Every structure is written in structure tokens, then in C-alpha cells.
Image (cartoon, rainbow, N blue to C red):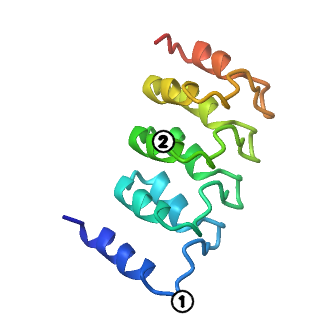
Amino acid sequence: MLSCHEGIVKLLLGLKEVNPDSSSYSGRTPLLWAAENGHDVIVKIMLERKDVNPNAPETTYGRTPLLLAAKNGHEGIVKILLERKNVNPDIPDTGYGQTPLSFAAYKGYDAIVKILLERKDVNPDIPDTQYGQTPLSWAAEYGHVK
């Protein structure tokens, strides 16, 4: 059974005049909001639409849905997004140059790190542009050894 919000999302997406990639003041699309806040069912509903761009970054820091899900520890959403071949797992944000893997390593989300590393197109050695740290150096600095 869908929650109220999930039902509303489905109802709105069923309307021809609704743009599923519309963005708010910060350039955040509905998919970005759902991914950041851990709404996995809504992410799935959004991704059913072919006109939803799963790589669309927000305009403030250039963070993608995958990056926000990884940064906030939403393992299920990371899995859902990575099931799509057109999701680029190595897009860094524009604020700090951190990738989804970098954020997951920094935060100590070992399950998300493992999921990301299963993708062949993830580069595990990309340094961020702010500090020049790789995912390994972030994990080592904060004591994440798993």
C-alpha cells in the first residue's frame, strides 16, 4: 500500500502537463529531493518515467541523486539508482569535487562503498578538488576500516 505522499506523486506524474524534471529554487528536481531524504518508493516511481534524468544535478553544489543518497547513507536508493545503466556513478559535485564513493567513504558507509565498487565504471582513486583526498584517504582519516 502506498503512503499518502507516494500516492500523490503517482497521481501528479499521471498528468501530461506535469514536468517530472522541474526544479526548485536550488535546482533540485523531485528525484533529487526523494533521493536525499530516503524516499525509496518515490525514487522508484520517479525512475519509471523515461523523461526523468537520473543524473540531473542541483545547481548549488552540483550534487546528483546518487551522490545525495550515498552522502546520506540511503543504501536502498543507491542500489535502485545503480540498477540503471545510464546512472553515472562518478559524477563529482561542483562544490568540493567529491564523488558518491568519496562521500560514502568519508561517512563510513561500508555497505554503500561496497555497492559502488561493484560497478566497473567507478574509479576508486579520484581525489576531490577541495582537499585532494581520495576515498581511501577520507576513510583512513576518519578511522573507517571495514
Q: Nearer the viewer, residue 141 or 24?
A: 24
Q: Which of 36 and 111 is in front in this view?
A: 111
Q: Could you tell me which residue is drawn at 67 percent across and 16 percent down?
A: 137
Q: Nearer the viewer, residue 73 or 9?
A: 9
**How far across and down, in percent of the image, does residue 39 sit?**
38, 56
**How far across and down, in percent of the image, does residue 128 sit?**
76, 31
Q: Mark 2 sits on what residue?
A: 78
**Which of pointers 2 and 1 lies earlier in the amino acid sequence?**
1
Distance between mark 2 and mark 1 Cα atoms? 29 Å
In the image, residue 146 sits, relative to residue 11, either above or below, namely: above
For the residue marked with disc 2, what is the amino acid? Answer: Val
Left/right of residue 32 with respect to residue 126 in the rendered view:
left
Left/right of residue 74 with respect to residue 23 in the rendered view:
left
**How far across and down, in percent of the image, does residue 55 sit?**
65, 54
For the residue marked with disc 1, what is the amino acid? Answer: Glu
User: Where, by quadrant of the figure, is residue 135 drawn?
Assistant: top right
Left/right of residue 94 with respect to residue 73 in the rendered view:
right
Quadrant location, the N terminus: bottom left
Mark 2 closeness class: few <14, some 14–19, many ≥20 residues within 10 Å = many
Mark 1 closeness class: few <14, some 14–19, many ≥20 residues within 10 Å = few
Q: Could you tell me which residue is drawn at 52 percent across and 13 percent down?
A: 143
**How far across and down, in percent of the image, does residue 87 sit?**
61, 47
Secondary element at tag 2: helix
Marks 2 and 1: CB-CB under 8 Å?
no
**Residue 17: image tag:** 1
In the image, residue 4 sits, relative to residue 137, either above or below, namely: below
In the image, residue 118 sits, relative to residue 93, either above or below, namely: above
Q: How many marks?
A: 2
Left/right of residue 31 with respect to residue 57 in the rendered view:
left
**Residue 31: image tag:** none
Secondary element at tag 1: loop
